[in-house]
């Protein structure tokens, strides 16, 4: 199997794209650990289905992340793959947006990824191998009204990944970014039907994507099949940005 013997950490892995990545990685032989923010039946069910190990961990709590990472590393003895997937939204138009809504999204989405990546990259540096994957968004590429905070955090992840790829490449550590478009998740399920239809018309393939279609790209970037790919941003949006 493509990921047999590899150890993977996936942040925000309890639902949506994260859960699909947990399932795919587990199916392909990886030993998977994932984090979540809120207790739910979905977490327990995912653990049972995949044998992955879940940890409740706040993206904004540095000490909690350090403790969780140390526990995982002590159990696994190495870290081959880090998928920075966890993120939040607090949408609103900027003139009315409280500063706390802007900074909290940056803290969780951008600084949270920094916290995990700093820890993982240190271990990978010693191993002289590893794959780090950031789950960004097309919102960080084209900008979306009402999402200045989210777009800023996701756009920053793309730049973060490119710079990090330059830093870590000499140690055979690869760093790449996936930018999903409209994917069938709890987040997009909240979009009013009329607005969703209008968005579908902007997509070349005329449909929203499925979480597993993003997970398939993550598998490729995590595996040795992509051994000569680093510093790249891969857009998975059904052709949405091609029409912008």
Image: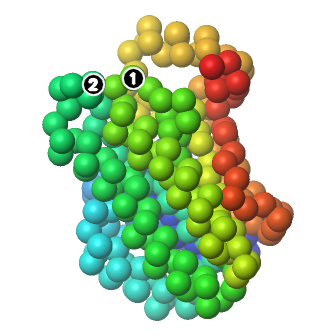
- Other-residue count near label 1 (Cα within 10 Å), few / some / many at <14 / 14–19 / ≥20: few
Q: Looking at the figure, which quarter contains the C terminus?
A: top right
- Position of residue 66 relative to residue 188, above or below, is below
Disc on the earlier residue, 1 or 2: 2
Q: How many marks?
A: 2
Q: Examine the rendering and report whether any part of residue 24 can be seen.
A: no
Looking at the image, do the residues carrying marks 1 and 2 touch, with CB atoms under 8 Å apart?
A: yes
Query: Residue 171 at x, y = what percent?
Result: 70, 82
The image quadrant of residue 141 is top right
- Other-residue count near label 2 (Cα within 10 Å), few / some / many at <14 / 14–19 / ≥20: few
Q: Which residue is mark 1?
A: 145
Residue 59 is marked as none
Query: Residue 2 at x, y = what percent?
Result: 78, 67
Q: Which residue is mark 2?
A: 93
Q: Looking at the figure, which quarter contains the N terminus?
A: bottom right
Which residue does the image show at 34% across and 39% down from the upper left? 149
Query: Residue 106 at x, y = what percent?
Result: 33, 50
Label 2 sits on a secondary structure element that is loop
The image quadrant of residue 225 is bottom right
Residue nearest the observer in this picture, 44 or 196? 196
Label 1 sits on a secondary structure element that is loop
Q: How is the image coloured?
A: rainbow
The image quadrant of residue 133 is bottom right
Residue 33 left/right relative to 62:
right
Which residue does the image show at 33% across and 82% down from the upper left? 67
Which residue does the image show at 37% across and 62% down from the upper left? 112
């Amino acid at each position: 199997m493509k990921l047999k013997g590899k150890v993977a950490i996936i942040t925000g892995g309890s639902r949506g794209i994260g859960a699909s990545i947990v399932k795919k990685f587990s199916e392909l032989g990886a030993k998977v650990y994932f984090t979540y923010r809120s207790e739910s039946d979905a977490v327990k069910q995912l653990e049972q289905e995949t044998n992955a190990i879940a940890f409740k961990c706040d993206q904004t709590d540095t000490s909690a992340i350090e403790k969780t990472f140390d526990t995982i590393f002590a159990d696994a003895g190495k870290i081959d793959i880090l998928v920075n997937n966890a993120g939040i939204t607090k949408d609103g138009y900027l003139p009315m947006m409280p500063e706390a809504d802007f900074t909290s999204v940056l803290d969780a989405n951008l600084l949270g990824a920094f916290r995990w990546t700093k820890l993982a990259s240190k271990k990978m540096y010693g191993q002289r191998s590893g794959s780090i994957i950031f789950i960004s968004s097309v919102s960080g590429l084209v900008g979306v009204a009402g999402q200045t905070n989210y777009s800023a955090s996701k756009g920053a992840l793309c730049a973060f990944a490119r710079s990090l790829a330059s830093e870590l490449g000499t140690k055979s550590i690869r760093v790449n970014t996936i930018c999903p478009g409209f994917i069938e998740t709890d987040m997009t399920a909240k979009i009013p039907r009329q607005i969703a239809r209008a968005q579908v018309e902007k997509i070349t393939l005329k449909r929203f994507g499925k979480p597993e279609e993003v997970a398939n790209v993550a598998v490729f970037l995590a595996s040795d099949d992509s051994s000569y790919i680093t510093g790249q941003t891969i857009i998975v949006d059904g052709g949405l940005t091609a029409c912008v």
